[in-house]
Amino acid sequence: PPKPFNFRRTLGELRETLSNRMFLILFAAGLFSAMAAGVNTSLGIYFARHFWELTTEQMGTLQLPYFLSALVALVLAPKVSHWLGKKQATIIISLITLVLTPLPPILRYFGWFPDNGTAELYYALLVFYTIDVTFMIMVATIAAAMFADVVEDSELRTGRRSEATFFAANSFAQKAVNGLGVVVAGQILAWVNFPASAKPGDVPQETLYELAFAFAPAIWVFYLVSVGLLSFYQISREKHEDNLRQLAARRSQ
């Protein structure tokens, strides 16, 4: 039933809701994923312009298949989630993303990727990015479903449904921490002494490889910490269904 607003009671309810252990695990894992995304997004333009020496038109058209990525992820995410379970699916797909994201520069270092200025390079990047973004969207989709499961777990403990609080807190924090990824990217550029206002073709090859080999560990660390935190998540399909049964029984009374 509605109650008159009380600031102290509201703070107490927020503290009780946001102290849910499963929420805190997902929350922390999401923060490290957001930092990885911030690094990847910030350095992406440097790889496109200087490492791969793509034209503006090529960089634009490389974004188009992401619509396909979203559609494929929409179909695959629930199937993989049902097959493996949400926690296992998120961990496995995150590990795949961890490998795929920095792979093209590493393959180039060993001479296993097409040369700059060739059509083969463009199409190889097109395929790589489409697959990589598909996995990223799948992780985000399944993680959101895991947050939804926390809603019933919290309701069982507190007697209140707090989905708005959970999703608002997570969304706000991820956007804020994504900026930390931008800061990390800036530190990587400073560490490799990336020249300011450089034009494509002007950056020494050694600097570009230093950038690639600094980028990869940063992505790996953030994703591995995120995966490590997810391993502590304990709401299985059986646990969630049991929560729903208990809530249904409580409402029927």
Image (cartoon, rainbow, N blue to C red):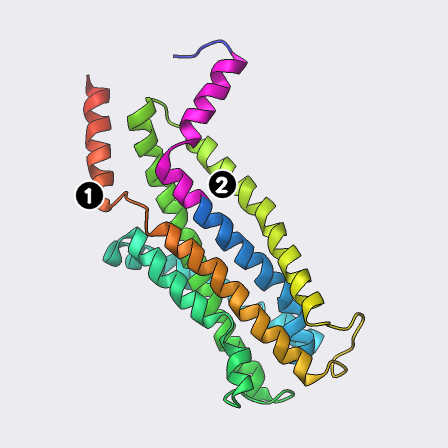
Left or right: residue 11 compared with residue 244: right
Q: Earlier in the sequence, mark 1 or mark 2?
A: 2
- Find residue 134 and report its horizontal and vertical position in percent: 44, 64
The part of the chain drawn in magenta is 6-27
Residue 25 in sight: yes
Q: What residue is rendered at 53% in x and 53% in y?
A: 34
Q: Is residue 68 above or below residue 11?
A: below
Label 1 CA crowd tier, 10 Å (few <14, some 14–19, many 20+): few
Residue 142 in sight: no
Mark 1 lies on residue: 238
Q: Tell me which amino acid carries mark 1.
A: Glu
> In what quadrant of the picture does the C terminus appear?
top left
Q: Tell me which amino acid carries mark 2.
A: Asn
- Find residue 170 and report its horizontal and vertical position in percent: 49, 41
- Residue occupying the far front of the picture: 191
> In what quadrant of the picture does the N terminus appear?
top left
- Find residue 62 and report its horizontal and vertical position in percent: 59, 72
